[in-house]
Amino acid sequence: MSDNSLFIAGLTGVTAIAASSLASWLTSRGNAHAARVQVDATTEAQRRDGIRQTRRAAYLCLIEQAQVLADGLRGVDGLSPDADGAALAAHRDRHQQLRRAVTLIDLEGPATVQVAASNLLIMSGTLSTALAALTENAARENRREFQETLRAYIRLIGPFVAAAAAALEET
């Protein structure tokens, strides 16, 4: 009988060591998995924050350029032909700045913001045409068309801001 007790004591010892080793191995695997999950979550949060910050900067740049363009054209109606020519050249410069800002929006997305930005750019081109017509002939109809186009352009800033805000909320 004493041989059996020695065997049982040895088996119990081996079982305890095996159980302890298995528990330690499982714990270390669980800790490693938890650490990986935490790193993945942190990385994803940082990625989302980076996207949000980049988009926010691009959106603010476009809003600023759109507003500068509108502000530069508000007083054009009562200018002389020479002043209108200078206003047209200044508008073309502002239009190019707006185009660069829209290109950045095209890179950053999403599609709803890209469409709103493109609408602003298209209307800015239409403003160029109306301003050129006003520069060539300051007739009442050209003035009216220019002012209507300017008001339409200004109305497009709001939908862009709304689309940008919604896109930032999603990220």
Image (cartoon, grey):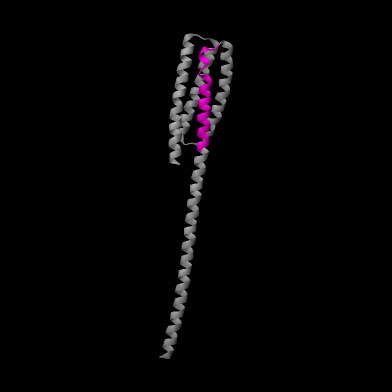
When asked about the image quadrant of residue 161, the answer is: top left
Q: Is residue 61 above or below residue 26?
A: above
Q: Is residue 12 above or below residue 33?
A: below
Residue, x 50% and y 37% (percent of image)? Answer: 56
Whether residue 105 is visible to the viewer of this picture, yes or no, is no
Q: Position of residue 137 (x, y in %)?
A: 53, 9
The magenta stretch spans residue 69: yes
- Look at the image and tell me in which quarter the C terminus lies: top left
Q: Position of residue 10 (x, y in %)?
A: 46, 83
Residue, x 56% and y 17% (percent of image)? Answer: 87
Q: Is residue 21 above or below residue 64?
A: below
Q: Position of residue 61 (x, y in %)?
A: 53, 32
- Look at the image and tell me in which quarter the N terminus lies: bottom left
Q: Is residue 120 above or below residue 2?
A: above
Count of picture labels: 0
The magenta stretch spans residue 33: no
Q: Position of residue 45 (x, y in %)?
A: 48, 47
What's the magenta bit mostly, secondary-structure-wise?
Answer: helix
Residue, x 43% and y 40% (percent of image)? Answer: 170
Name of the residue lying farthest toward the bottom:
1
In-front residue for pair 111/55: 55
Q: Which residues are magenta?
A: 55-79
Residue, x 49% and y 61% (percent of image)? Answer: 32
Whether residue 114 is visible to the viewer of this picture, yes or no, is yes
